[in-house]
Amino acid sequence: MKEERIRSGRLQKAPENFLTQSGIQAVFGEGKNGRRDFIRNAFAAAAAAAAAPVAMAQGNPVPVEGGDTNILNLPEHAVGLGQGVAVEGYGKPSKFEANLQRRQSPGLTQTTQASVSFAPLQSLFGIVTPSGLHFERHHQGWWDIDPSKHRFMINGMVKKNMVFTMDEIMRLPSVSRFAFIECGANTATEWGNVAVPTVQYTHGMISCSEFTGVPLITLLELAGADLKNGKFVLAEGGDGSSMTRTIPMSLITSGEVIVAYGQNGEMLRPENGYPLRLVVPGVQGVSWVKYLRRVEVGDKPYAAKDEAIHYIDLQPSGLHRQYTNLQEIKSVVTTPSGGQVLLDKGFYNITGLAWSGKGKVKRVDVSTDGGRNWRQARLETPVLSKALTRFNLDWVWDGKPAILQSRAQDETGHVQPTYQQLRAVRGTRSTYHNNALQSWLVQENGEVKNVQVS
Ligand SMILES: Nc1nc2c(c(=O)[nH]1)N[C@H]1C(S)=C(S)[C@@H](COP(=O)(O)O)O[C@H]1N2
Ligand SMILES: [Mo]
């Protein structure tokens, strides 16, 4: 592997800066329960298991040869009384998982209210993002709105304007579907080659949930919307950000767009739009209007501030692309990834996530040599349209430097671009819709680093 192909990124702030941020340290592996320890422990356990088959019945240990003899000492939890079920209230993760948190990026300057927190992709399994770890993007802070006071209005090109209470909405026929939501600005720091250190910061503005609610088309039909001439709707949020977005009617008549109140089996979290948000599968996060209070039917795009001057893509020609709403095919290796440390050569499970706003992920290939050779990864079921898809691949690390990449393809045949391919079309001054291949450099000492491979 030629070293000159590797252009390691600049850090916007000195590394010391984020090492001193409370809580962040663990991400880099120094914390007691950080990922590094997890991998180390997993290795110790694997080594022990490999050394001798373990045979033990509770209270009747059978001596084993090799491995950790601690297995013969029954811990307190195997002989004492556990905690009673009298633990009422909302269940919480183990105290040993206290480092599992969404976090603000060291690569971004944020104000208190106009802010982002990133989901810890490196520590998640499967395809569902636990609601408490869902990324957050607020243009003007979040609210915990009293659902009994919340109202939702439909107006514009309709027979009659309608106002719904939450109770009225929740009486209507509901649907549930899994969908990913990705902020259009996800992976934006990489456009400028700002190498934020972990996958949490490179790709953590994506999450996937099961959403429940009423198809917007049902509500539009109740209001007698003009579905022939009404080609667009404007969705308006109830916070102070004046968040309004144009949604093409074609997405709505297909039944995909949901006025949602449920997320992963319970009501939406306040940070994610409680009590009502728009779910627009495949479309960038900004269109998933939170605290949804109004939908207006119209016959042309509204050119709202968040589509006329923000969320536009500066092209090499100097012109901007507008209304680039779909999140195109993308994937990322989440383990091993930046900030993690491989402790020894040998077997590892490479795992990651793939998604496409155009439908199902068809295939993911993984390279461990910076894109020269590729192997097809296993897609775990379920593989759902416009939802996250989990992939896995067996890998034996030989202890030499390696560059890990994943490259996804969707059912429409679209393949994720390299940075070279992306920049050839989009230039270098874009912010949104970066779906290029992510590279993680595994160094000889096992430390994994964010790099860009051209
Ligand atoms: N009302 C309202 N809706 C909003 C926003 C907002 O600030 N206010 N942010 C948008 C943006 S830019 C994104 S990426 C998603 C983030 O959703 P989340 O905070 O649930 O992750 O919500 C969108 N909907
Ligand atoms: Mo966003």
Image: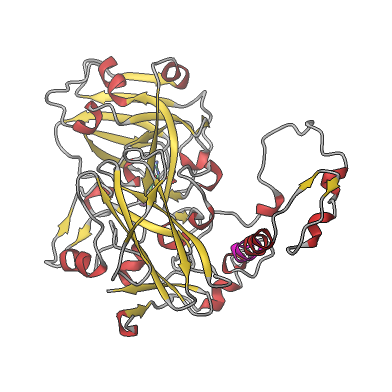
Indicate which quadrant contains ligand 1. top left
Counting from the top left corner in percent of width and height, residue 442 is at 46, 73
Residue 36: quadrant of the picture: bottom right
Location of the N terminus (image quadrant): bottom left
Counting from the top left corner in percent of width and height, residue 78 is at 83, 45
Residue 375: quadrant of the picture: bottom left
335 and 307: which is toward the camera? 335
Q: Is residue 234 visible?
A: yes
Q: How is the image coloured?
A: secondary structure
Name the residue located 58 percent from the left edge and 73 percent from the top edge. 19
Question: Eyeballing the image, is 226 above or below 326?
Answer: above
Counting from the top left corner in percent of width and height, residue 261 is at 45, 29
Q: Is residue 143 visible?
A: no
Q: Is residue 38 found inside the magenta-colored segment of the image?
A: yes
194 and 4: which is toward the camera? 4
Location of the C terminus (image quadrant): bottom left
Question: Eyeballing the image, is 329 above or below 42?
Answer: above
Residue 428: quadrant of the picture: bottom left
Q: Is residue 240 found inside the magenta-colored segment of the image?
A: no
Name the residue located 35 percent from the left edge and 29 percent from the top edge. 258
Name the residue located 36 percent from the left edge and 51 percent from the top edge. 354
Q: What residue span does the magenta drawing correspond to? A: 34-41
Furthest toward the right, the residue is 80
How many numbered marks does the figure carry? 0
415 and 183: which is toward the camera? 415
Counting from the top left corner in percent of width and height, residue 418 is at 25, 66
- Please name the predominant secondary structure of the magenta segment in the image: helix
Name the residue located 53 percent from the left edge and 48 percent from the top edge. 133
Determine whether, in the image, residue 428 is placed left or right of residue 294.
Answer: left
